[in-house]
Image (tube, grey):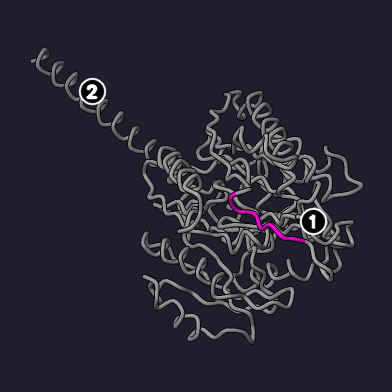
C-alpha cells in the first residue's frame, strides 16, 4: 500500500511538472502581454507597451498650424483603427471642438472594416496629431489603479514653454474627464522620446533630454524621469540621428538636407520588444556611403548599439540586440530644385541647386497592441523594388520578435512628413483594476 502511494505521488509530480513547463512556455510565447507589472520605487510605473491594453487613443482632426487634416492623413488613422478592431481593441478617438462631426467621421470610416461600437468619441479644443507626446501617459500604481504623467512641453525644444504648453494642457482636461489623478513635473519629456522594458529600465537620448531641459544637470533629469515614469534605471543613449532633427528656423540639418523630425525620439531608432530584447535600426553600407546625412546617422546609430551592448537590466543581465533595416532616405526623400521665391535662398541656396526634404521614416515607429503590431511599409507601384525588399525584411524581423501577434503593415508617409509615424499618433491605455 505504501509503495503504490509513492508511485502515485511520483506520477502526480511528473504530470504537474509537465503542466508547469507547458504553461511557462505558453506565457513566454505571448511576448509578455500578461506579464506582472514591475512597480517602481514610488509605487507606480509606466507599463510596457506589450502589456494588455483596454484601448488605444488617436486624434482625428488636427490643425494646430492652420492646415486642415487631409484625407490621406485620415486614411492612415483609419487603417490603424481597422487593424485594432480586427483584434477587438477599442479606440478613443479625439475630435476637435467645432471640427468634423462624429457622423462625418463614421461616414469616412465606412470604407474600412471598423466597428462604430468600438469607437468612443471625445472632443477637445486643441488636439494635436502626436498624442503620444502631448496626450496622457498612462501610469499604473501597485493597486492596479490609473495615474497620468504630466510633463511640461516646449514643442520638441523649438518653442518657449508659454507658447507650447496650451497644446499639452489638453491632457489636464483629459485627466479631469477620466477622473484620473495627474502626476505633474516641471521637466520636459515626450512619450516618443522614452522607451521602457516593463521591468524597471528606461532608455532615452542624452542630447535630447539636455536640450529639452536647459539649465538642468543630467543627474537632475535622470532623477525626475525615473520618478515620473516609475522606473529604476536609465540607459542614456548619446546622440540622436540628424534625420530626426527639427531646427527652430527651418534651416538645413546638414548640407542641403532639411528635416521634419521630432528632434530626438528614441522610438525612431531603438525599441524594447520584451524585457530583455531591443530592436535597433541599421543603415545600409550603400546608404552610408551615398551622402553626409546618412554617413553621420550611421555613426550615431552604431553608438547606440555599443551603448546597449554595455548596458544591463536591473539584475545585471545583458540585452539581446536585433538589427532592423532603416529605409534608405534616397528612396523616400523629396528632391527639389531651388527657384526664386522659395524659402531656400535665405539659407544660401541658389536657383537651380538641389535640396532635399526628409520625412521621419522608420520601421521601428510601430504600435504594439493586443494581438497585433502595426508597422510601416513604404513600397507602392512605381517605387524601387529595393524598398519592397526592406518592407518585407522588417516585417519578417517583427514577426520573429512577436510570434504571438499579427504584423500589419500600412504606409504612414503622410504622417512621416509631419515629423512622426504610427507610434507617434497613438497612445495605449492599460487595463486597470475596476
The structure residue drawn at horizontal position 36% and vertical position 70%, both measured from the top left corner, is 113
Q: Could you tell whether 294 is left or right of 95 in the image?
A: right
Asked whether 389 or 143 is in front, the reply is: 389
365 sits left or right of 341 in the view: left
Relative to 75, does residue 382 appear above or below in the rendering?
above
Q: Nearer the viewer, mark 1 or mark 2?
A: 1
Identify the image quadrant of residue 359: bottom right
Does 362 sit above or below residue 110?
A: above
Residue pointed to by mark 2: 13
> Which residue: 52% across, 69% down?
92
Q: Nearer the viewer, residue 304 or 199?
A: 304
Q: Secondary structure at mark 2?
A: helix
For the point 65% across and 59% down, which residue is it?
148
In this rendering, is residue 262 above or below 289? below
The residue that label 1 is drawn on is 353
Q: Tell me which corner region of the image, top left, top right, bottom left or bottom right, holds residue 408.
A: bottom left
From the top left corner, tell me how far across and down residue 362 is, in percent.
59, 48
SS under mark 1: loop
Few, some or many residues within 10 Å of mark 1 (<14, 14–19, 20+): few
- Labelled disc at residue 183: none
Q: Which residues are magenta?
A: 331-337
- Picture layout, residue 27 above or below residue 214: above
- First in sequence, mark 1 or 2: give its number: 2
Q: In the rendering, at what x and y percent does residue 430 appear?
A: 51, 56
Whether residue 44 is visible: no
Is residue 369 shown to the viewer in this render?
yes
Residue 236 magenta-drawn?
no
Residue situated furthest front in the rendering: 352
Amino acid at each position: 500500500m505504501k509503495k503504490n502511494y509513492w508511485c502515485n505521488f511520483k506520477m502526480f509530480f511528473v504530470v504537474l511538472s509537465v503542466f508547469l513547463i507547458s504553461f511557462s512556455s505558453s506565457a513566454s510565447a505571448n511576448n509578455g502581454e500578461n506579464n506582472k507589472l514591475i512597480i517602481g520605487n514610488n509605487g507606480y510605473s509606466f507599463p510596457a507597451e506589450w502589456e494588455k491594453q483596454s484601448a488605444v487613443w488617436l486624434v482625428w482632426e488636427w490643425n494646430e498650424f492652420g492646415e486642415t487634416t487631409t484625407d490621406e492623413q485620415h486614411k492612415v488613422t483609419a487603417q490603424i483603427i481597422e487593424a485594432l478592431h480586427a483584434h477587438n481593441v477599442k479606440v478613443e478617438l479625439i475630435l476637435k471642438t467645432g471640427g468634423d462631426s462624429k457622423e462625418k467621421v463614421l461616414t469616412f470610416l465606412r470604407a474600412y472594416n471598423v466597428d462604430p461600437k468600438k469607437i468612443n468619441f471625445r472632443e477637445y479644443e486643441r488636439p494635436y496629431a502626436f498624442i503620444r507626446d502631448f496626450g496622457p501617459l498612462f501610469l499604473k500604481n501597485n493597486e492596479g489603479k490609473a495615474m497620468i504623467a504630466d510633463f511640461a512641453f516646449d514643442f520638441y525644444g523649438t518653442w518657449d514653454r508659454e507658447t507650447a504648453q496650451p497644446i499639452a494642457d489638453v491632457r489636464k482636461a483629459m485627466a479631469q474627464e477620466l477622473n484620473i489623478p495627474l502626476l505633474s513635473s516641471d521637466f520636459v519629456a515626450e512619450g516618443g522620446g522614452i522607451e521602457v522594458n516593463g521591468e524597471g529600465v528606461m532608455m532615452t537620448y542624452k542630447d535630447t533630454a539636455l536640450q529639452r531641459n536647459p539649465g538642468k544637470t543630467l543627474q537632475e533629469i535622470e532623477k525626475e524621469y525615473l520618478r515620473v515614469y516609475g522606473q529604476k534605471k536609465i540607459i542614456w543613449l548619446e546622440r540622436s540621428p540628424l534625420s530626426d532633427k527639427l531646427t527652430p528656423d527651418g534651416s538645413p540639418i546638414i548640407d542641403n538636407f532639411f528635416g521634419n523630425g521630432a528632434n530626438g525620439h528614441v522610438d525612431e531608432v531603438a525599441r524594447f520588444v520584451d524585457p530583455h530584447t531591443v530592436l535597433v535600426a541599421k543603415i545600409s553600407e550603400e546608404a552610408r556611403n551615398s551622402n553626409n546625412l546618412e554617413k553621420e546617422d550611421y555613426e550615431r546609430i552604431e553608438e547606440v548599439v555599443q551603448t546597449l551592448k554595455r548596458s544591463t537590466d536591473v539584475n545585471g543581465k545583458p540585452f539581446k540586440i536585433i538589427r532592423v533595416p532603416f529605409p534608405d532616405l534616397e528612396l523616400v526623400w523629396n528632391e527639389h530644385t531651388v527657384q526664386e521665391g522659395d524659402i531656400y535662398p535665405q539659407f544660401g541656396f541658389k536657383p537651380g541647386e538641389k535640396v532635399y526634404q526628409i520625412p521621419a521614416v522608420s520601421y521601428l515607429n510601430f504600435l504594439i497592441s493586443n494581438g497585433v503590431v502595426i508597422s510601416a511599409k513604404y513600397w507602392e507601384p512605381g517605387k524601387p523594388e529595393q524598398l519592397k525588399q526592406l518592407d518585407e525584411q522588417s516585417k519578417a524581423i517583427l514577426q520573429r520578435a512577436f510570434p504571438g501577434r499579427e504584423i500589419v503593415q500600412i504606409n504612414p508617409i503622410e504622417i512621416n512628413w509631419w515629423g512622426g509615424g504610427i507610434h507617434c499618433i497613438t497612445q495605449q491605455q492599460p487595463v486597470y483594476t475596476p
